[in-house]
Image (cartoon, rainbow, N blue to C red):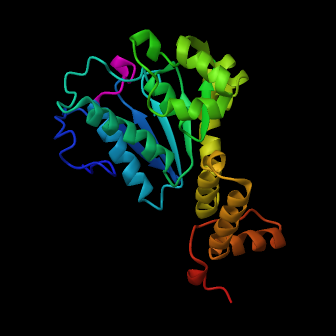
């Protein structure tokens, strides 16, 4: 299993693994669905789950056939956050251990493909921030969200301090992170924390339809757009414009930019491949 980028192999030492995997990956029509699979524990994140999820994201990042990603949980819950009772936590310095876990949030943030979180049940603590770290969050009407950290004597982690102010503003972010209250999917949607709330019976189809749309899009262009938006609050307007120009120059060298023009001319839906213009074979 690959070590997280930036980590030395000895940072946390080898992680003992159960025979039963904690993460499942299924693929269909360009969509990789990653399921946290500890339903009896509401998919609480053990170190084994973190390692397996990191390995799954690495594999997806390197696979051109994976055009979009869905992250969800088994058994009617997304994730109850970090498993504080995990008996197999690495026996290393706590800072090294935390960095190992935090690196997973960065891997999600830098993944080339667009990611949808499909949320049922609880998404709390690190589980909440795993969902919020995805590009789009679709949730069932019965789902619940919480930055539960202060109720456990902890401060926010898994990217929450970066994500929350960008999603809901600094004052609402402080309310969520300091009080740790559980909020409904309807409230999460109302404050801009998630994208859509659906009846539970409609959630699967809505996510499938949306993931299919993303998988059919131009992969290079969408990856660049994802990067531009993720960095937008850290750059000046001048730098953003320069970054956009550079990204567009990359797009001009893809067959997808030509395909987009052809599709517009022919009045048909485009068929994007992510291939280089050099390999397109067009005159």
Compared across the picture, whether 186 is left or right of 26 comes to right
Q: Residue 194: x percent and y percent?
A: 64, 29
In the rendered image, the vertical position of residue 71 relative to residue 124, given as above or below: below
In the rendered image, the vertical position of residue 1 relative to residue 206, given as above or below: below
Q: Quadrant of residue 126?
A: top left
23 or 80: nearer the viewer: 80
15 or 267: nearer the viewer: 15
Residue drawn at (62%, 30%), measured in percent from left and top?
Answer: 165
Residue drawn at (57%, 67%), measured in percent from left and top?
Answer: 274
Tally the marks. 0
Q: Quadrant of residue 242?
A: bottom right
Residue drawn at (65%, 26%), measured in percent from left and top?
Answer: 170
Q: Residue 220: x percent and y percent?
A: 59, 63
Considering every residue shown, the one lying at the far bottom of the view is 283
In reply to whether residue 41 is colored magenta, the answer given is yes
Quarter of the picture containing the C terminus is bottom right
In the rendered image, the vertical position of residue 32 relative to residue 73, given as above or below: below
Residue drawn at (73%, 54%), measured in percent from left and top?
Answer: 237
Highlighted range, magenta: 39-46
Q: Residue 238: x percent and y percent?
A: 73, 59
Q: Can the viewer see residue 22 in this picture?
A: no
Q: Residue 248: x percent and y percent?
A: 68, 68
Magenta segment's dominant SS is loop
Compared across the picture, whether 233 is left or right of 109 comes to right
Compared across the picture, whether 184 is left or right of 65 comes to right
Q: Can the viewer see residue 258 in this picture?
A: yes
153 or 254: nearer the viewer: 153
């Amino acid at each position: 299993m690959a070590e997280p980028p930036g980590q030395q192999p000895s940072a946390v030492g080898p992680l003992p693994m159960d025979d039963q995997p904690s993460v499942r990956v299924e693929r269909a029509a360009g969509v990789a669905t990653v399921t946290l699979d500890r339903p009896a524990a509401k998919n609480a994140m053990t170190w084994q789950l973190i390692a397996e999820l990191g390995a799954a994201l690495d594999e997806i990042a390197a696979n051109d056939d994976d055009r979009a990603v869905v992250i969800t949980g088994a058994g009617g819950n997304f994730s109850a956050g970090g498993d504080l009772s995990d008996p197999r936590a690495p026996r290393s310095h706590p800072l090294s251990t935390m960095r190992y876990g935090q690196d997973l949030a960065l891997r999600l943030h830098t993944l080339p493909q667009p990611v949808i979180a499909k949320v049922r049940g609880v998404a709390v603590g690190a589980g909440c921030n795993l969902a919020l770290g995805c590009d789009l969050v679709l949730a069932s009407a019965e789902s619940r969200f919480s930055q539960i950290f202060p109720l456990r004597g902890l401060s926010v982690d898994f990217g929450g301090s970066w994500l929350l102010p960008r999603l809901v503003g600094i004052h609402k972010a402080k309310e969520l992170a300091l009080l740790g209250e559980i909020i409904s999917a309807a409230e999460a949607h109302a404050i801009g924390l998630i994208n859509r709330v659906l009846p539970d019976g409609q959630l699967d189809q809505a996510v499938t339809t949306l993931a299919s749309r993303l998988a059919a899009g131009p992969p290079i262009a969408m990856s660049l757009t994802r990067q531009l938006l993720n960095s937008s609050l850290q750059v000046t307007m001048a730098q953003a414009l320069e970054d956009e120009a550079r990204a567009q120059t990359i797009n001009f060298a893809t067959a997808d930019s030509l395909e987009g023009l052809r599709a517009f001319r022919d009045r048909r839906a485009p068929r994007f491949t992510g291939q280089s213009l050099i390999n397109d074979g067009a005159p």
